[in-house]
Amino acid sequence: MEFFRDTNIDFLGKKWYFLVFSLVFSVAGLLSMAFWHGVPLGVDFRGGTIVYVKYAHTPDPSAIHSEIERAGLKNARVQRIGQAVNNEVLIALDIQETNEEALDKGKTQIIQALESHASAGKQDLNNSSSLAVAKYLLEKDPLRLGSGADASPRYTAMAQAVVDYRDKTKGGVLSSIDELKSAADPAVVAVLQENFYVSDFGIRNVEIVGPQVGQQLRKQAILAALYSLAGMLIYLGLRFEWIYGVAAVLTVFHDTLITVGAFSLLNWEISLTVIAAILTLIGYSNNDTIVVFDRIRENIKLLRRDKLADIVNKSINQTLSRTILTAGLTFLTVLALFLFGGEVLHGFSFALVIGILIGTYSSIAIAAPILVAYQEWRGESGKKPIAMPLRSGNGPTQPKEKVKA
């Protein structure tokens, strides 16, 4: 299957347009990282407290963020997670202590910030533990069990049943205390109504990433990217020539810069899943580049007297159909993931969407022109032109053919 047959597009003739396009997006990303939003690292890398909150209605992240800011919690990040019908949000705070008190502190601060309609003197049943409910029931003794030995176990079991009904049956949020009538004794429900109310949200979970862990993850992410680039440079240097490895590394750096710059411009957090996507794109972009390079190598054997610029143009046109077909199908897949994959995969899929577009573009518009620019520089400086090692299968390396400028 081919989308294009016998194309003759002068890609190298448009190299200055490509250069302007790349400069605009690269410089915009660099300016954003330097002066506007910086590199918006997620809690995975900077450390902090993550609080998962479920609402009884559709949450408004902007309104939630405003409430948190008014409560004095600065630099908090709020984003929706999961499917829209779940009404869940993730709130990231800069609390970085790694102890039990920090977990309670983060939970308490979020509850206090979001309880704008709290009932004076009453406890929030949606954010009360089974121990708090059991303690209250034991104190009020709605079943008139007295101080017998079975009072504490029975009320503890009733409190656990209430919490289980809230968390497992109602998804973590009760709309009304009356909903408990199907899960608890009417006397218990009545006494709970005296001292409890239900808010419109419930804290589902609290997690902490310590600053040392975040620093270690940052270091490992950077090393993973550098090792990938080094391996690519070595492989292409051995497979082709070192200039081809340099061109591929510069191309991947260009792709990564634009992708990270897009996250900075949009002020979207870069998490571990985004790093995984970027590492995936390094391999994807490199694969596209190698396809073009391999066709260049084959054509050099056939068109020994042609200029390298003409050979590169011809090679790009010959692989254009394959490039568009492969990239197009992959792009449609990640686009569907971006549109329908939910908030948890939003950053990951967005990085793939941007990376595939830029990676496909750069294999044609960045990598190949670097080879020609290097060839022209060598010609102007009186040095020998690029030589390509001709290999076939596992046989011995054939003598290098010279390409005349």
Image: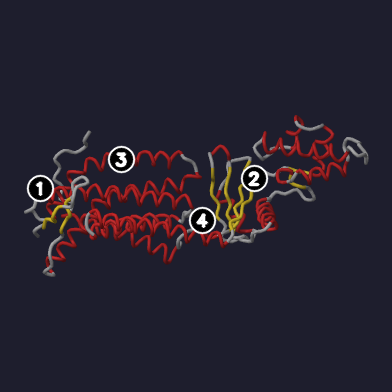
The CA distance from mark 1 to mark 4 is: 51 Å
Task: Say what amino acid the circle numbered 4 marks.
Answer: Gly
Residue placed furthest toward the left: 305
Residue 383: numbered disc:
none
- Labels 1 & 3 near each other (Cβ < 8 A): no
Q: Residues within 10 Å of mark 1 (few under 14, many from 20)?
A: few
Residue 147 in the image: state x and y as whole percent.
93, 41
The CA distance from mark 1 to mark 3 is: 30 Å
Which residue does the numbered mark 2 point to in the structure image? 204
Q: Nearer the viewer, residue 14 or 271?
A: 271
- Labels 3 & 4 near each other (Cβ < 8 A): no
Label 3 secondary element:
helix
Task: Say what amino acid the circle numbered 2 marks.
Answer: Arg
Which residue does the numbered mark 1 point to in the structure image? 302
Which residue does the numbered mark 3 point to in the structure image? 328
The CA distance from mark 2 to mark 3 is: 40 Å
Label 2 secondary element:
strand
- Labels 1 & 4 near each other (Cβ < 8 A): no
